[in-house]
Amino acid sequence: KSTLLAGLQQALPCVVAFTQDDYIIGRDPTAIEARLGGRDLHPGTVDHLRLLEDVCQCLQTAQTAQYVLIEGFAAFHDPTLFNIMDARLWIDLHWSQIYDRLRPQNQEQEDFVLKTVLVNYEQYRQSFQGRMDLVHCVDGDFSHKEALADSLAYIKRVTQARCWNKPEDVY
């Protein structure tokens, strides 16, 4: 997600970006989630109200922002935030890809990934399945360049008349 966000920030003009990691509630740096790179992966760990307030304030006051991007696993959890989005991207990953990216280093981390992270991921994914017609799925097997090109094509279709840099200029 963060690599795609960085590519979109370079390719799109006048971007303001929000990262859900900045809205994690009560993150304990000694907790196993932090040792796995802060990947809490549960919608209940995000201060959705504060994120929504910050996004709405940005939309009302940021005169130069043409694109407001929200990066985070639980970005679709808040229905109000979901409904104000013009374009919605979901990077569709198989559980084995998630496991590989988290790279558990010991049995405690592996148990956490298998019993908590992957379970939460699948529950969250299922929770918005009824709205998937409103979401563009980016194939998790795409290269970074392919994911960026696919995402930009989708955003262009949704937002129409914008200035565009070519995806190949980004990488």
Image (cartoon, rainbow, N blue to C red):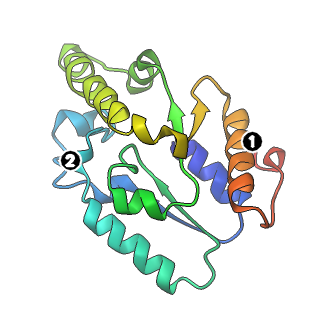
Tell me the crowding category of disc 2: few under 14, some 14 to 19, or many 20 or more residues within 10 angstroms, Cα based.
few
| Whether residue 135 can be seen here | no
Look at the picture and state if 152 lies above or below 9: above
Residue 11 image point, x, y percent: 73, 56
Residue at the image point whose x is 32% and y is 56% from the top: 78
User: Looking at the image, which is closer to me, 171 or 150?
Assistant: 150
Measuring 50% from the left and 77% from the top, which residue is drawn there? 59
For disc 1, the neighbor class at 10 Å (few under 14, some 14 to 19, many from 20) is many
Mark drawn on residue 129 = none
**Amino acid type of the residue that numbered disc 1 sits on in the rendered structure:** Ala
Tell me which residue sits at (43%, 15%) in the image: 96
Whether residue 123 can be seen here: yes
Q: Mark 1 points at which residue?
A: 149
At numbered mark 1, what does the secondary structure look like: helix, strand or loop?
helix
Image position of 28 (left or right of 82): left
Residue 149 placement (x, y as % from top left): 74, 41
> In the rendered structure, which amino acid carries the disc numbered 2?
Gly
Residue 97 % position (x, y): 47, 20
Mark 2 lies on a secondary structure that is helix
Quarter of the image for residue 31 reads: top left
- From the image, tell me which residue sits under label 2: 44
Viewed as shown, does residue 148 lie left or right of 55?
right
Q: Residue at (66%, 49%) from the top-left corner? A: 7
Above or below, 46 relative to 15: above
- State the separation of the CA atoms marked 1 and 2: 32 Å
Q: Quadrant of the C terminus?
A: top right
Q: Which label's residue is closer to the chain start, 1 or 2? A: 2
Counting every numbered tag in the picture gives 2
Say if mark 1 contacts mark 2, CB within 8 Å.
Answer: no
